[in-house]
Image: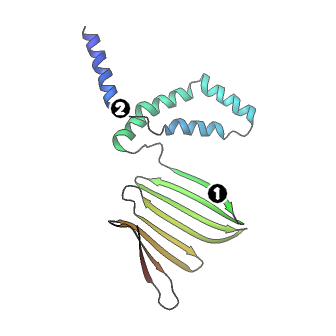
Amino acid sequence: MKRITAALLAMVIAMVSLQGCYGKMALTRKVYQVNGQVGDKYLRSLVTWVFIIVPVYGIAALVDFVLFNTIEFWSGHNPVAQGEKDFQYSENGDTFKVHAQKSGDTLRYTFNRYHGDTHLDTLTIDWNVKTGNSVASLRGGDNVTQYQAMRSKGGVQVTSSAPDAFNPGRQVTALYQ
């Protein structure tokens, strides 16, 4: 009877502590991405079978569910999901190389814009996901324009300090509702 009571108690504690703990499954996704980066389709298929036979996917999913998603549920942060990512895209002859980095509650995006091999400008955005406030800096040549977006009662207040030939450091504020 004591074993049944202990087992029921353990199940109840697990159900309460893991309730709604689906999470990002970040470790499992990273293992899947590693498999997806194998260029040859036959080799990728072989790696998939190896990851299934040597239970890499199963262990990653179990560690995600029991450890990392539980940490994410209680703290709001998944330690595996934090990190960096690089990608690029092209539009109208310009190429944008993007570097995204997450650290705690802050996301930093750096956009480098190129036309051919010529670097045109860099936009850096720091965004606090909890407060919703952000700071951005646009650098093109010798010019630097700063932007700050802050939540206010009526919407979002955006402040810009742009270099101006007649009035350097002039600030412009707008309220978006």
- 100 up-or-down from 163: above or below: above
Task: Using the rendered view, name the quadrant where residue 42 is placed.
Answer: top right
* Residue carrying label 2: 19
Give 21 or 110, whichever is nearer the viewer: 21
Who's the residue at 33% across and 21% down the image?
11
Q: How is the image coloured?
A: rainbow
Residue type at tag 1: Gln
Task: Using the rendered view, name the quadrant where residue 129 is placed.
Answer: bottom left
Residue type at tag 2: Gln
Q: Is residue 79 left or right of residue 37?
A: left
Q: Is residue 77 left or right of residue 8?
A: right
* Residue carrying label 1: 88
- 77 up-or-down from 128: above or below: above
Who's the residue at 28% across and 11% down the image?
3
Residue 142: % across, % down: 57, 80
Find the distance from the CA under tag 1 to the CA under tag 2.
38 Å
Which element carries disc 2, helix, strand or loop?
loop
Residue 41: % across, % down: 74, 35
- Local crowd at mark 1 within 10 Å, few (<14), some, or many (≥20)? few
In this figure, what is the number of numbered marks? 2
Which quadrant is home to the N terminus? top left
Contact, CB < 8 Å: mark 1 with mark 2?
no
